[in-house]
Image (cartoon, coloured by chain):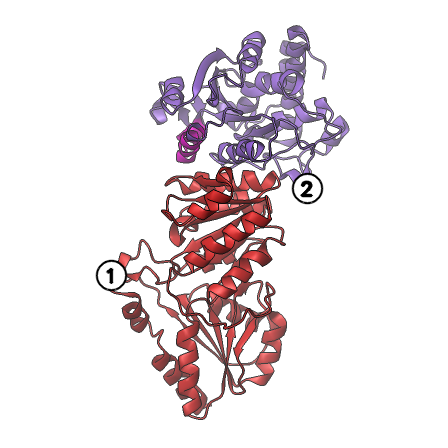
Chain colours: A purple, B red
Amino acid sequence: MVETAALEFVGREMRARIVETSSRAGIPHLGSCLSCVDILVALYFSVMRIDPQQPRAAGRDRFILSKGHGAPALFQVLAKRGFYPESRLESYGEDGGVFAEHPPTPDHLEGIEAATGSLGHGLPIGLGMALAARIQNRDYNVYAVLSDGECNEGSVWESAMLAAAQNAGNLCVLIDFNKWQATGRTLEVMSLDPLADKWRAFGWNAVEIDGHDMNAILDALNKFPAKNGKPTAIVAHTVKGKGVSFMEDDNNWHYRIPTTEEVVKAKQELGVQA
Amino acid sequence: MRNAFAEELTRLAAEDPRVILLSGDIGNKLFDRFKAVDEKRFYNCGVAEANMMGVAAGLALSGLRPFVYSITPFITTRCFEQIRVDACYHHAPVVIVGTGSGLSYAELGPTHHSLEDMAILRTLPGMRVLAPCDSTELRLALRAVLQCDGPTYIRIGKKGEPAIHANPPAFIIGEVIVVRPGNDVALLVAGNMMAETLKAAELLAVQGISAEVISVHTVKPLDDSYLQAAALRFRLIVTIEEHGVIGGLGSAVAEWRARTNVVVPQLLFGTRDEFMHEVGSQSYARAKYGLTADNIAGRVLATVGRA
């Protein structure tokens, strides 16, 4: 188990690189990327049973970024974890490359399990993978990160009902509950609250945590898979734009691209020279 | 055809541990024997087709071979984006089987008609579109598709369709089957219009017109080499399908003609650009849209006569 402080440092490093890449390549969704970084770091650097040298190993844990617009965060984490050289990210945003706004298909980038970007798709695909483990007598787990806005999609709840009916206990959903969707507050656009209770009502184990508290994230993930055989939903309260004071909880950063000066300021705040 | 589907898939499941069946809450008792082969390879995914398609893609990406089964509009138009992104974009070997296609469920009304399914699924990159003409072709198609990568859509009827093939023909995806050889006109059929078309060929024979009747069980990819030869051999190419004339076999052949600059006239039989608002049986609906042996033979005769 890697130390919490080390994970937190990786989180700051990832944030700096995400901000820098957004500025350099003109990639939006910065706020959405920064809110899920700690969850990704916990999964990739502590929890998941994965080997970057064998990205297609049959028994590997699966990760799906159902909120595909967080791909700029995932791309940095996969590189840092060793799925491909960090130097590959220098081509970010270039024509003909693979690094842009959403994950490509698994055939086009190591470490990717599903191409997402259209919301409400990742969880059903993840459920299929979770059921496949049972059919093929494998013991891997499937993790899917959803956005709170994504929970507007009916397919999320279709999937939630089937997962519970099938006792897909090896399926874990983490909701990056940053309280914003593209054009408004998630609690106002749709009636999202009480989110954890909704998952419970759909037959899941559900916990609420501070999605930026590394110990809390690890603690929740370590209680999965649950002994009662139900799938697990971790509702992670997060802050959009977390880690950079002038981006935090400001929904303009759903689409804004930081200037060079803003990148310098963000890095100073993060205390990272990435 | 749906009984043949259940039987053949059960057989395939016994032979191949990768075969999984997902059903959208239909087929009560139809799949009891499949479940007896291996209960954990059958999933009733409920009335939730979007999720079902995503689940199928997840299974396929894990090395399994899911067959997704429901009434055609619900397993095609309803969850089109899941087919596009989850199955096609990932080039996942998901097999979608739409039952009650075309006007099979005419009496249930337009919610249950499927006259656009081939049109929309044909547009998806890498998607095969199959329309077997009888249970024998369906069984062969199911077997053949297990050897293929990537997604496939198979549109089938309901039950009680006439058997066309007395013996199993050679079946290769993408290659037509000549059901009745002929010399003057080519009647290209997609799916369950085969029996009616064979009757039309009989009527034409009486008038001295020799019609070749062809099962175009694979609407995508089209059998280019057969069409190329047919364009030279026949005075007229006719497409017949229980599907709209926009986007189905007729359109596919018209696109082929435009693409290859082949000069051969084409007659299209299919449903018009409208919903059928009145109640009616399948035969009523077919008559309404000119999908009868009499009408096909009459129009072919008139066209060839004019030529």
Q: Name the disc covering residue A156, or none.
A: none
Query: Is residue A125 in view from this perspective?
Result: yes
Report the magenta stretch's main SS: helix
Secondary structure under the numbered disc 1 in the rendered image: loop
* Amino acid marked by disc 2: Asp
User: On the image, numbered disc 2 is attached to which residue?
Assistant: A95
Tag 2 subunit: A
**Which is more toward the observer, A99 or B32?**
B32
Is residue A78 or residue B294 the one in the foreground?
B294
Q: Is residue A241 left or right of residue A74?
A: left
| Residues rendered magenta in the picture | A149-163
> Do badges 2 and 1 share one subunit?
no
**According to the image, label 1 marks what residue?**
B277
Q: Taking A168 as reference, is A234 above or below it?
A: above
The answer to whether residue B54 of the structure is visible from this angle is: no
- Disc 1 marks a residue whose amino acid type is His
Q: Residues within 10 Å of mark 1 (few under 14, many from 20)?
A: few
> Are the two marked residues, 2 and 1, in contact with CB atoms closer than 8 angstroms?
no
Q: In the image, residue A231 lies at what x, y percent? A: 47, 23
Picture layout, residue A152 above or below residue B233? above
Quadrant of the image occupied by residue A93: top right
Residue B210 among magenta residues: no
Looking at the picture, how far across and down is residue A126, in whole percent?
53, 32
Q: Chain of mark 1?
A: B
Query: Farthest residue toward the bottom?
Result: B208
Residue sitting at x 55%, y 20%: A36
Cα separation, mark 2 vs mark 1, equals: 50 Å
Is residue A88 positioned above or below A107 on the image? Answer: above
Q: Position of residue A123 (x, y in %)?
A: 50, 32
